[in-house]
Amino acid sequence: MNLANDERFITSIQNVVPRVPRATRRPPGHYDPPEHGEYRAAIDPIFRRVNLRAHEESFQASATTLIAAMLERGHADAVQDLAAPFVVDCFASLLGVSADLAHHIRTVGVRYTFAIQDMDEQVVGECSAELYVIAENVYRARLSQRPDPSTDLVASLHAAALDPNTAITETTAIATVRQLIVAGMGAPQAVIGSSIAHLALDQSLQAYLRTHPEELPAAIEELLRLHSPYRVFARTASEDVVVHGRLVREGEPVAMLFPSGNRDGRVFEDPDVFKLNRKGNSHLAFGRGPHKCPAAAMGRREIAIALRTLLESTETFELSGDIKMMNWLEYGPRSVPLSLVPRETPEFR
Ligand code: HEM
């Protein structure tokens, strides 16, 4: 049974465990089909590969600049100096906001996620309210530039809000931007940090990918499987359901542990081992069903650009201290200290 793709399990009650106190439901993550589908119809086309191409240059420029600064020092933290600022720059490019505003968004977003880890309801409430103000400012500022609804996230949501055939309103469109702010930064940061740590610990894989860049997409799928950045999402049973012989009563929450599913030995042979070109690598890193990540293509591009640029700019990089991990919700490092040896002549670009 696939809980993520079964309409008897809904997300409108809670989509994480433990439940995060919240004043309002935000689309699309906290909405159920069929209304949920209206938001996805507005969001999904923006993340098509063809639309993401317009952002490639700025994604690349960010990675090149950040990695050049790391190389100049010879040592760096893969999360603080690369993964975290890089995903902010990528998100700023997607939203069409200035890097300064994106960094402000990130400061509030980080405070918010740590308050959630600490279950500090007061700070969660304060940050959440501030993120709403930011989302509304982003929404209004972006619309004043009259962007194209077929390629711009805010314009697409705005067009849907004006469409009388959808239940989307300006308020819920802004709430969607608010949710994207949090969803768009945490996961790619975590998985880029984990992937760099993995390559620092596996020098032969690192050397192999440096000389075989064409294998990087397959390596990324295996890194996503092994280091899925979301520990858990939740659904609630809308009626009594028997799951693998166990009764789940109506109203009970069920945790979906995607990282655990990705290491299920019944599905993946030698599940804890990195296998390049693993056959049938249908991992769950981006989820399943109606809530499957709309931005999987963007996430994959972010990881690819960060890793490829790091590999091609270095002779080698290795750990220079202890990895520190995050507590919750994401699974990934908060610090990966590295020493780096720059490459004299990049061979592939
Ligand atoms: C490697 C990077 C990423 C990973 C592994 C990832 C993973 C996921 C997963 C597992 C879900 C499913 C949640 C559920 O089942 O309830 C999800 C949903 C979502 N993700 Fe991502 N994500 C990534 C990047 C992004 C980015 C870059 C954005 C936005 C710019 C984004 C926006 C969203 C949104 C809005 C949802 C909610 C979709 C819905 O409920 O319909 N994600 N993501």
Image (cartoon, rainbow, N blue to C red):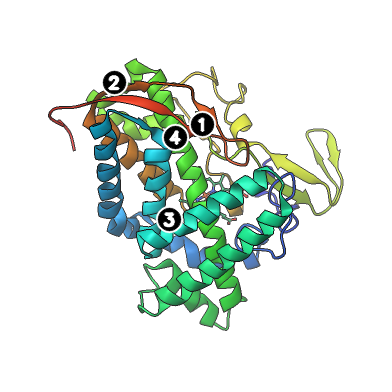
The residue wearing badge 2 is 208
Task: Residue type at mark 3: give it.
Answer: His
Ligand 1 near label 1 (Cβ, under 8 Å)? Answer: no
Residue 329 location, quadrant: top right
Task: Residue type at mark 1: give it.
Answer: His
- Which type of secondary structure does the marked residue at label 3 adopt? helix
Q: Position of residue 98 (x, y in %)?
A: 36, 63
Q: Any mark on residue 193, and which? A: 4
Left or right: where 240 falls relative to 200: right
- Which type of secondary structure does the marked residue at label 2 adopt? helix
Disc 2 from disc 1: Cα separation: 20 Å
Viewer-side residue, 10 vs 330? 330
Task: Residue type at mark 4: give it.
Answer: Gly
Above or below, 115 relative to 280? below
Residue at image point 43% right, 74% down: 155
Above or below, 227 relative to 275? below
Disc 4 from disc 3: Cα separation: 19 Å
Q: Kindly tell me whether residue 136 is visible in this rendering.
A: yes
Q: Earlier in the sequence, mark 4 or mark 1?
A: 4
Ligand 1 near label 4 (Cβ, under 8 Å)? Answer: no
Question: For the view shown, which residue lies furthest in the left direction?
Answer: 345
Q: Position of residue 71 (x, y in %)?
A: 25, 32
How many C-alpha atoms fall within 10 Å of the one at disc 1: few (<14), some, or many (≥20)? Answer: many
Q: Earlier in the sequence, mark 1 or mark 3?
A: 3
Q: Earlier in the sequence, mark 2 or mark 3?
A: 3
Viewer-side residue, 257 vs 105? 105
The residue wearing badge 1 is 227
How many C-alpha atoms fall within 10 Å of the one at disc 2: few (<14), some, or many (≥20)? Answer: few
Viewer-side residue, 50 vs 76? 76
The residue wearing badge 3 is 103
